[in-house]
C-alpha cells in the first residue's frame, strides 16, 4: 500500500479569479481530490503570471474576465513562458466563438462557471494528460481543430485555411490598442499614449479587424466588451 501511494504524483493547480467567493468554491472542489494540490491563487493577471512563474503549476483554472489583463492575454503569455502548463478557461461566456478564442490563446479546455464539480475534476486530469476538453468532450489536438472548424467555419467570415493562422491570437500590443479603442481614443490619441507612430496604430487596427473579422473599430470594441476581454469599468476608467 505504501509503495502504491508513493507512485501517486500530485497535480499542482493554480486558481485565477477576481471574486474571492468563487475562488474559494474552486478551491473546495479541487481539494476533494487527494491527487490535486493548490499551489497558488491570484485575483488579477499580472499577479497570476508572477505566481505561475514561481510555483510552476501543472494546471491553471483561469477566469476570462480579469482586471488589468484579461484571461486570454494571461493565457497567451503564460503559455509562451511555460508551454508545459495547461490552462482551463472558466467563464460565463459560453459560446462556440469564445471557445475558439480561448483555444487559439493557448487554453486546453473551456467550461462555463456552472460546471459540475466532478466534471471539473475530470477536466483537470484530462488536460494534465494532454487532452483538449469542451464540456464533457475530450479531444486530441487534431480533433479539437476539426471541432472548431466545424462550428466556427459556419459563421460569417469563416476561418483561416491553415492551423497556424487559425490559432493566431491578438498580440499584447494589439490587445493594448483594442483596450484604448474601447475607451474611445482616436488613432492619434492611441499613438501618443503608446509612444508609437500613427501608422503603427493603423497597422495594429488592420490586424485586429482581420483577426476578429470585424468591419470597423466600433464592432471590435463591442466584440471585446461583449466577450469579457475588457471590463466595462476598465474601459470607463480611461475616460
Image (spheres, rainbow, N blue to C red):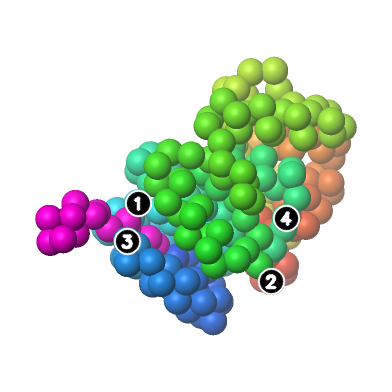
Q: Which of the two marks, 1 or 2, is nearer to us in this view?
A: 1
Earlier-in-chain disc, 2 versus 3 = 3
Name the outermost residue toward the left.
3
Circles 2 and 3: CB distance less than 8 Å?
no
Which one is closest to the eye, mark 1 or mark 3?
3
Identify the mark at residue 58; answer none if there is no mark. Answer: 1
Separation (CA) of disc 1 from disc 2: 32 Å
Q: Residue at x 54, y 81 (%)?
A: 21
Q: What percent of the width, then of the height, locates residue 7?
A: 19, 52
Residue drawn at (53%, 30%) of the image: 141
The quadrant of the image that shows the C terminus is bottom right
Which numbered tag is attached to residue 35?
Answer: 3
Give the answer, above or below, for where 79 lies relative to 51. above
The span picked out in magenta is: 1-14
The image quarter in which residue 139 lies = top right
Report which quarter residue 97 is drawn in. Answer: top right
Relative vertical location of residue 45 with respect to residue 149 in this rendering, above or below: below
Do tag 1 and tag 2 residues touch (Cβ < 8 Å)?
A: no
Disc 2 or disc 4, which is closer to the eye?
4
Q: Residues within 10 Å of mark 4 (few under 14, many from 20)?
A: some
In front of the other: 232 or 75: 75
Mark 1 or 3, nearer chain start: 3
SS at mark 2 in the image: helix
* Mark number, residue 233: 2
Out of 14 and 35, give the one closest to the viewer. 35
N-terminal of the pair, mark 2 or mark 4, is 4
The CA distance from mark 1 to mark 3 is 12 Å
Return the residue nearer the eye: 163 or 72.
163
**If you read the primary sequence from the N terminus, does the residue marked by circle 1 or circle 2 appear first?**
1
Task: Determine contact: label 4, label 1, CB under 8 Å.
Answer: no
User: Quarter holding the N terminus?
Assistant: bottom left
- Which residue does the numbered mark 4 point to in the structure image? 94
Amino acid at each position: 500500500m505504501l509503495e502504491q501511494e508513493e507512485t501517486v504524483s500530485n497535480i499542482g493547480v493554480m486558481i485565477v479569479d477576481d471574486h474571492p467567493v468563487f475562488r474559494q468554491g474552486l478551491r473546495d472542489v479541487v481539494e476533494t481530490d487527494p491527487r490535486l494540490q493548490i499551489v497558488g491563487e491570484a485575483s488579477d493577471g499580472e499577479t497570476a503570471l508572477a505566481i505561475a512563474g514561481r510555483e510552476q503549476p501543472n494546471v491553471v483554472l483561469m477566469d476570462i474576465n480579469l482586471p488589468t489583463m484579461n484571461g486570454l492575454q494571461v493565457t497567451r503569455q503564460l503559455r509562451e513562458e511555460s508551454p508545459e502548463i495547461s490552462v482551463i478557461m472558466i467563464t460565463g461566456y459560453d459560446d462556440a466563438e469564445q471557445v475558439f478564442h480561448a483555444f487559439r490563446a493557448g487554453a486546453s479546455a473551456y467550461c462555463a462557471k456552472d460546471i459540475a464539480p466532478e466534471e471539473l475534476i475530470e477536466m483537470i486530469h484530462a488536460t494534465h494528460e494532454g487532452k483538449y476538453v469542451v464540456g464533457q468532450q475530450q479531444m486530441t489536438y487534431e480533433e479539437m481543430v476539426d471541432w472548431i472548424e466545424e462550428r466556427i467555419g459556419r459563421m460569417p467570415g469563416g476561418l483561416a485555411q491553415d492551423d497556424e493562422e487559425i490559432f493566431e491570437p491578438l498580440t499584447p500590443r494589439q490587445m493594448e490598442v483594442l483596450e484604448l479603442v474601447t475607451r474611445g481614443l482616436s488613432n492619434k490619441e492611441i499613438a501618443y499614449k503608446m509612444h508609437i507612430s500613427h501608422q503603427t496604430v493603423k497597422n495594429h487596427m488592420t490586424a485586429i479587424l482581420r483577426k476578429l473579422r470585424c468591419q470597423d473599430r466600433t464592432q471590435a470594441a463591442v466584440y471585446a466588451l461583449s466577450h469579457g476581454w475588457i471590463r466595462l469599468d476598465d474601459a470607463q476608467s480611461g475616460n
